[in-house]
Amino acid sequence: MVIGLLGGVGSGKSTAAGLFEEIGAEVVDADRLAHEVLRGPAASRKVAERFGPEVLGPDGEVDRRRLGERVFSDRKALEDLEAIVHPPVLEAVRERIRRHRRAAGGLPAPLLVLDVPLLAESPLRGECDAFVFVDAGLAERRSRTAPRGWAPGDLDRREKHQLPIEEKRRLARWVADNSGSIDRLRSEIARIGAEARSMGAHGGIPGRPPGAGKTV
């Protein structure tokens, strides 16, 4: 089973991914893969050519905070950055999915969980057997993102470039409530994982209808 994580900015998708790892799932962290791409000389050169040398740090590597300030206030700039970073990240994620499906061999296999920003808008959406929507209120998400040092309004600007929250929720088979304690979320992820493994063992999720999300 390939499970995709959805949610608003600051909802805790990466926390949920870590809890899936605790129950034995393999997690693909696309943000980590993007970091690796941006650290490479080819991507750094292309980013500096497009956005100027001021987005590079003293070590010559891309300063992601400076770059983020540029791209999330300019749709065209964001698209240009995606054109540099997305192709190699997309291929890396797809290779992980291919390996996972080959290893399954028709037998029950551990879950593969995709922690991919903008997954609902990505071509990787079609690679997922089901989605988990990680839910948290706006006030809580603002509080969680405050330590990141974003400029005022950054959360709202970033979400304007994403599928609306309610549409993401409708895509999900499961909704994991992350407005409470970590232990509560851990319990929900464990129950989702058990159900997903059971479905995977029986050949996947029949029908996968949009809007089938439910809270466990």
Image (spheres, rainbow, N blue to C red):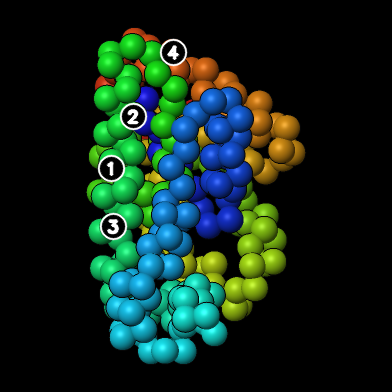
Comparing labels 1 and 4, the label whose residue is closer to the camera: 1
Q: Quadrant of the N terminus?
A: top left
Q: Position of residue 11 (x, y in %)?
A: 58, 50
Look at mark 2 in the image and give the residue it sits on.
100
Precedes in sequence: disc 1 or disc 3? 3
Q: Would you say 19 lies left or right of 103 here?
A: right
Look at mark 4 in the image and give the residue it sits on.
198
Q: Residue at x 53, y 57 (%)?
A: 9
Q: Position of residue 122 (x, y in %)?
A: 30, 52
Q: Is residue 215 visible?
A: no
Look at mark 3 in the image and give the residue it sits on.
88
Q: Quadrant of the C terminus?
A: top right
Mark 1 Cα-neighbour bin, 10 Å: few <14, some 14–19, many ≥20: some
Comparing labels 4 and 2, the label whose residue is closer to the camera: 2
- Number of dots carrying numbers: 4
Q: Whole-Å distance between the Cαs marked 4 and 3? A: 33 Å
Q: Position of residue 198 (x, y in %)?
A: 44, 13
Precedes in sequence: disc 4 or disc 2? 2
Q: Is residue 161 above or below residue 9?
A: below
Amino acid type at image mark 3: Pro
Amino acid type at image mark 2: His
Mark 3 Cα-neighbour bin, 10 Å: few <14, some 14–19, many ≥20: some
Precedes in sequence: disc 1 or disc 2? 1
Dot 1 lies on which element? Answer: helix
Q: Whole-Å distance between the Cαs marked 1 and 4? A: 24 Å
Amino acid type at image mark 1: Arg
